[in-house]
Image: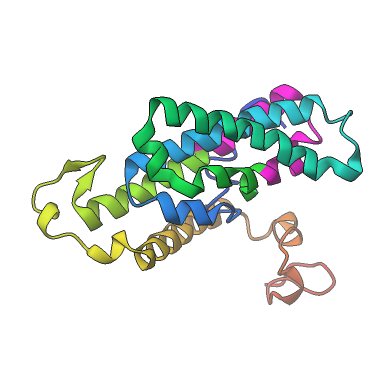
Amino acid sequence: MSKLSNLTRGIIRENPVLVLVLGTCPTLAVSTQASNAVGMGLAATFVLVCSNIVISALRNIIPDKVRIPCYIVLIAGFVTVVQMVLEAYAYSLFKALGIYLPLIVVNCIILGRAEMFANKNRVIDSALDGLGMGIGFTLTLLVMASIREILGGGTWFGMPIPWLRDNGISVLTMAPGGFIVFGCLIALVNKIMDRKRNPKDKGYCVGCPSADTCSKFGMGGEING
């Protein structure tokens, strides 16, 4: 796999939120304001890149039986650095992110990339993978937060928008609105991905966990229709 592919696949093709459906808790929680979304995305990206680099560099040293606890300790160290920097230089963002900032330690995106990629690949590839996944996570948060903040609160990055300021769709600023926007974005990405896939490609169905029960995929491994 090329280095460019390692960098770009996390943006759409393997977007951690909209395709892999990971990290949904912080996604729904902090996507009410664009500024909070960007802050969370950058913090997670920093932890992703740094943890991937260190875990990849130590992959032959960390004992297999205790690799998950070791990953968590390493990730927690980088999360602590992020917390201290934000508390010192961006206190309002630190307070806005609240409990979701330290919970980056157990974010499924970071642990998943550590286990599935950094543990098996070289340092540079792992760094690019972490950066790509971080960019995809940040962009998803920004898009969701922009939709919710503009249509729900009538502002964007705190700047008021004429007419929408007094006629916002208030449900979008609440939890149900987060699920609505989240579901619509997943549907949009699935539609885009379906157009790019070749339904006659055997590998497309073989890799699907629902292949055995799908009417388009025969029990013997052949494509029906």
Residue 195 visible, this angle: no
Give the left or right position of residue 59, taking residue 164 as reference. right
Residue 82: x and y, percent?
A: 53, 31
Residue, x 71% and y 69% (percent of image)? Answer: 210
Q: Between 184 and 96, which is closer to the camera in this rendering?
A: 96
Q: Main secondary structure of the magenta part?
A: helix
Give the left or right position of residue 141, taking residue 163 as reference. right
In the displayed structure, 81 sits above or below 159; it is: above
Q: Between 201 and 16, which is closer to the camera in this rendering?
A: 16
Residue 40: x and y, percent?
A: 46, 40
Residue 87: x and y, percent?
A: 44, 31
In the displayed structure, 222 sits above or below 68; it is: below
In the displayed structure, 21 sits above or below 143; it is: below
Residue, x 74% and y 58% (percent of image)? Answer: 207
Residue 102 visible, this angle: yes
Residue, x 90% and y 41% (percent of image)? Answer: 64
Q: Is residue 129 magenta?
A: yes
Residue, x 86% and y 43% (percent of image)? Answer: 66
Q: Quadrant of the N terminus?
A: top right
Q: Between 44 and 122, which is closer to the camera in this rendering?
A: 44
Residue 19: x and y, percent?
A: 57, 53
Q: Which residues are magenta?
A: 111-135
